[in-house]
Structures are given as C-alpha cells and as structure tokens.
Image: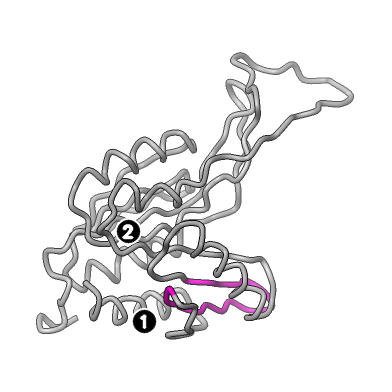
Amino acid sequence: MAARNRFLKGKRVLITAGPTWVPIDGVRVISNLSSGAMGRALARTFARAGARVTLLEGPVPNAADIPGIRTIKFSFYDELGRRLKQELKKPYCCVVHAAAVADYRLSKPSRGKLPSGKKRLNLKLVPTQKLINKIKRWRPACCLVGFKLLPAGQSRMVRAQACRLRKESGCDLIIANVLKPRYQAWLLDSKENVLARADARPGIAKKLIHTLKERL
C-alpha cells in the first residue's frame, strides 16, 4: 500500500481472533472450530494502512507471526477477558472483536482429571458473560467493530442477528457473515444500513478499512 494511503498511521488498533477454551477438568476443554483467519486478515490489512496493531490470538494450530504486528496469545475465556481489560487501559482508537468467544462454560469444572470409562457423563453448562458488551465500558471512546457469524443463512437472518448484537454491545460497526452455501459478509453501521459486502475475508477487511477512514 502506497504511503499516501497509510491513513491509519500511528493509530492504535486492537484485534481479537481465534477460539477460546473453557475447562471441563484439569486436562480437557470445550472449544470451537475458529481458525483465526478473519482476525489475521484484518491485522494485516490494518498494518498495511499504517496502524499500530495488537492481535489477541486464541489457541489456533499455527500461531500468527506477522511482521510489524504485536501478537499476544491466550487460550482460555477468562484469560482473554483479563488481557482485553488490561489492553484497553491503553488509548486504542478502534477495537475489532473477531474472536469466537465461548458462549457457555461448565458451572463447576473439575480441578483434577475426570475418570474415563463412565457410561454417561452429564456436564452442566451456564452462559458466559459477553465480553463484547464490556468493551465500551472499558474504552468508551473507541470505535467498536463486532462480528456475527452463522454457519448458514440468508442475509435477512444474519442482519437480524447483527441488530441484536448492536443493541446489546453498542457496536459502531458490525460484520455479519455466513459460511454456507458460500462465504458472504456484510458490513453494517449502527443504523443497520449495509455499507459494503464481500465474498472473501480479505475483501471485507479492505472495505472495513475504507469505511473507518472517515471515522477515525
């Protein structure tokens, strides 16, 4: 990207990416299938636009090693919450919360290892607190970009879910995306207007960058 297009030069941007674990016992966890690909695409795009990017990355198979980007690793839900709160003491102008955060956790994880060989094992799950709903409390002035992912669905369904996320979290922008029948993403503003759409992660990352040019 040419120097004249580095309009985010020097601005702090915090991006979360990848899955979060919640413990079952001392050696087992519940996770999800997030690869962190969206967060990495965003981190690269923001860095090319000149931003000072910090990437909070969950336990993905191949950890990001992107030149010029500060990467902080986490594994567990509680760990992400602590690191996010700590980082938001710094003057980030934009937070892009792309991590696939666990929605449920065990009410009482076992401290040791649960014995194998049981015919049945009942796990009681309770909802986790929505970390995205805390971001504006921790850093009120930041531009908050949230994500709503559905495995499959039509644009109307995804946009309805995005609307709910906006009302709960106070997001300034939302990227709503589906994986099937093919990847599609929509960028919505706080009034639920569709600002852009794309059929690939790098494409929606670039369109987000150009939208933020007028906001940061």
The answer to whether residue 169 is magenta is no
Report the Cα–Cα distance between label 1 and label 2: 16 Å
| Residue lying at 48% horizontally and 84% vertically, measured from the top left | 194
| Front label number (1 vs 2) | 2
If the image is split into quadrants, where does the C terminus sit? bottom left
- Relative to residue 174, is residue 150 drawn left or right? right
State the image quarter where residue 5 is shown. Answer: bottom left
| Residue 70 versus residue 216 in the image, above or below | above
Q: Which residue is mark 2?
A: 95
Front-lying residue, 69 or 125: 125
Q: Position of residue 85 (x, y in %)?
A: 32, 40
| Percent coordinates x, y for residue 150 in the rendering | 63, 66
30 vs 193, nearest the viewer? 193
Q: Residue shown at 75%/29% (left/top)? A: 123
| Residue situated in front as seen by the camera: 118 or 196 | 196
Which range of residues does the magenta coloring cover? 175-190
Crowd around label 1: few <14 · some 14–19 · many ≥20 (10 Å): some
Of helix, strand and loop, which mostly describes the magenta segment? strand
Res. 178 image quadrant: bottom right
Within 10 Å of disc 2 (Cα), the crowding (few <14, some 14-19, many 20+) is: many
Please indicate whether residue 123 sits to the left or right of residue 63 in the image. Answer: right
Q: Quadrant of residue 66?
A: bottom left
